[in-house]
Amino acid sequence: MRIETFSLGWSSRGRRIVEDVELRIRPGETFGLIGPNGSGKSTLLRLMAGLLPRAQGRVELDGRPLATLPRGEIARRIALVAQAADTAERLNAREAVELGRTPWLSPFAPFSAMDEAIVSDALEAVDMTHMAERSWSTLSGGERQRIHIARALAQRPRLLMLDEPTNHLDIQHQLALLRLIAGLDVTVVIALHDLNQAMRCDRIGIMDGGRLISCGPPAEVLTPERLSAIFRVGARALTDPVDGTQQLRFHCLEDHL
C-alpha cells in the first residue's frame, strides 16, 4: 500500500505539533521515523492513521483520500501499535489478540476457524503461544507489547504503523521483532529512538520541531553533521567485519572538543 501526506499538520491549544509534512511511502517499504523527544513522531503516526481530529492537509492511501474512507475499511487496511496501548484486564492474551480480527467480522462473517488460525499465527510470530491463556493483568510490560504487536498482525493490515515497538523488550525480542518486520509483505512505518535500529530501514525521515527535515536512505540522512545539529551527539560509522553492515558509535560532543 502506498501512503502519501500533503501539507499534513496538527495543532493543540494554539501550538503547532506537526507542520506541513509532505511524505510519500512506497508499497512494501519499511520507513523509519526518528527524532528527539517531542519532535512530533507519535503525532505524525496518529495523523497518518486518521486518528486525530481537525488535521490540516490530507492523507491518501493508494491515491484515495483517507478522510473519504469508512472507518471499517481503514481498520482493515491500517494497524497502529501505539506507545500507550492498553487492553481490558479481564482478557487473557489470546483474547486480546483476537480483537485484531474485529474489523473483518460481521453478523454474516462471525469468528471462524480461519480467524482462529490467524490469531495462532500472530501469537507464534511474537513468541507468545505458550502464554496464550495468561491473564492480561499478569503479563509484564514486554509481554504486553508483544501481544499488542500480535493483535496488529492478526488484523492482517496492508499498512503497519508501530510507535517505539521495541520499548520494554529485551534484546532477544527486539532483534526478533525487527527480523519479523523485515519479512512482512506489507508497508511499514516505524518510529524508533534507536538510530542503529533505524539503519535497518529502507528509508528514514527525521522529525525536528514538528517538521520533517530530511528523508532518504539511512546512510545518507544520518550524517555526523545532522546528528550533531539535531541530536546533539557526535557519531562515527563503523563497519561490522563479519557482515559489512554499518553501525553508529555515539559520543558526547564535549568529549571531542
Image: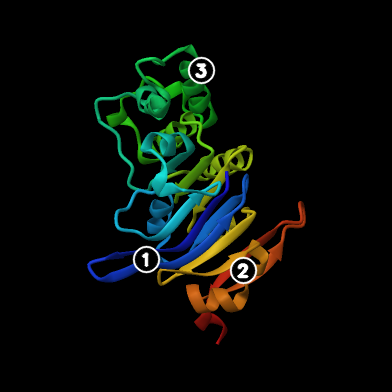
Name the one closer to the observer, 34 or 172. Answer: 34
Task: Inspect this view and state whether residue 171 appears.
Answer: yes
Q: At x 55% / y 73%, what residue is drawn?
A: 227
**Label 2 crowd (10 A; few <14 / some 14-19 / many >=20):** some
Q: CA distance from mark 2 to mark 3?
A: 41 Å
> Does 78 sit above or below residue 57?
above
Residue wearing tag 2: 221
Please identify the residue farthest to the top as the structure is shown: 113
Q: Earlier in the sequence, mark 2 or mark 3?
A: 3
Residue wearing tag 1: 38
Q: Secondary structure at mark 3?
A: helix
Residue flagged by tag 2: what amino acid is it? Val
Residue 147 in which image quadrant: top left
Q: Secondary structure at mark 1?
A: loop
**Which label was assigned to residue 124?**
none
Name the one closer to the observer, 213 or 223. Answer: 213
Residue wearing tag 3: 117
Residues at badges 1 and 3 in contact (C-beta under 8 Å)? Answer: no
Residue flagged by tag 3: what amino acid is it? Ala
